Amino acid sequence: MKSLKVIFFGTPEFAKNSLEAIHKSHHEVVGVVTVADKASGRGQKIHQSAVKEFAAENGLPVFQPEKLRDPQFLETIQNLQADVFVVVAFRMMPKILFEMPEIGTFNLHASLLPDYRGAAPINYAVINGEKKTGATTFFINEKIDEGNILLQRELEILPEENAGELHDRLMEMGAELVVETLNGLAENSIQEKPQPKVEHVKNAFKIFKEDTRIDWQQNSETIHNFIRGMSPYPSAFTFIKIGEDEKFLKIYKGKFDIFGHEEKPGKLEVDKHHFKIYTKDGVYLPEELQLEGKKRMTIKDFLNGFQHFDHISIG
């Protein structure tokens, strides 16, 4: 089978798995482009991306341009004479760059395009209660996630799976799909096709902090899926009042019960054995949470820390 020369563009763990899969295949990685090292945390330590760490450990050339239009960077990439560029979880690329290789530049996206274009496809698939999702490889063009499809593969979303768990399964499947796409391009056996025209495309816009607050006015299943879809990151939150103090409370996991009631949605009932929050059509029962200033813990450990339950309410 023909071997392709590949330049890989990516940053996080999700991308690293695809890079590793290409490196283990018969294709040749001639360069890796990733984000610049960043200082983070209390000590402002310098951290490298997961992609850079893997590339460095395996002796792959690494490039970390501040600007993708930088003439010197573009010349360096051109001189590597790659057949194809592969992009996984990277920033938008200028046309002058993605049109450079002879075969083209393709991206791996964690959804069944055209649905869930955008930055958070895994989160929104779970939030919206989808039963299946998948991964798509497609040629990049000037529009976000709208290029011609190369390959797609479906994946069932498990009933109680959260976004983090689905992320890990899609990461593995996506890496396989990237290599399969390279093999197909090498043998000229893939017929690219335009994305289907859909009247109401489901979007997956970037999630901001204000988007992660739980709305207790909604029904129980909607709240349950929202919490699953935000777990473990960026995590869904509510406010809890302990006495006169209002604190931030993240909820990572729970279950729900549907029944008729006259209580106001958002009302909290709590004692040393139970913690339940009324919804529009029942109650939500948190199982794993994190109070502001504390570590993530089970509901049992959380309740063990309180003595006066009549002082607690949802803010």
Image (spheres, grey):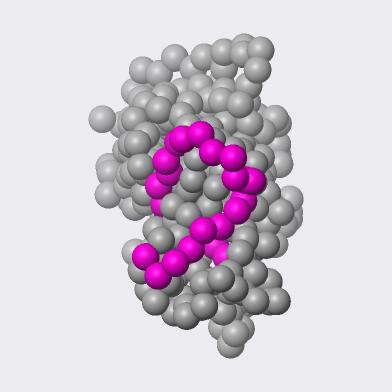
Occupied quadrant, residue 124:
top right
Q: Percent x, y for residue 24?
A: 27, 49
Q: Residue at x 44, y 52 (%)?
A: 285
Q: Percent x, y for residue 267?
A: 60, 53
Quadrant containing the C terminus in the rendered view: bottom right
Q: Does the rendering let one see residue 85?
A: no
- Position of residue 137 relative to residue 197, above or below, is below
Q: Residue at x 43, y 44 (%)?
A: 256
Q: Residue at x 57, y 23 (%)?
A: 114
Quadrant containing the N terminus in the rendered view: top left
- Position of residue 315 relative to residue 46, above or below, is above
Between 314 and 90, which is closer to the camera in this rendering?
Answer: 314
Q: Percent x, y for residue 243?
A: 65, 76
- How many marks the image carries: the answer is 0
Occupied quadrant, residue 187:
top left
Between 155 and 9, which is closer to the camera in this rendering?
Answer: 155
- Position of residue 313 relative to residue 144, above or below, is below
Magenta region, residue range: 249-273
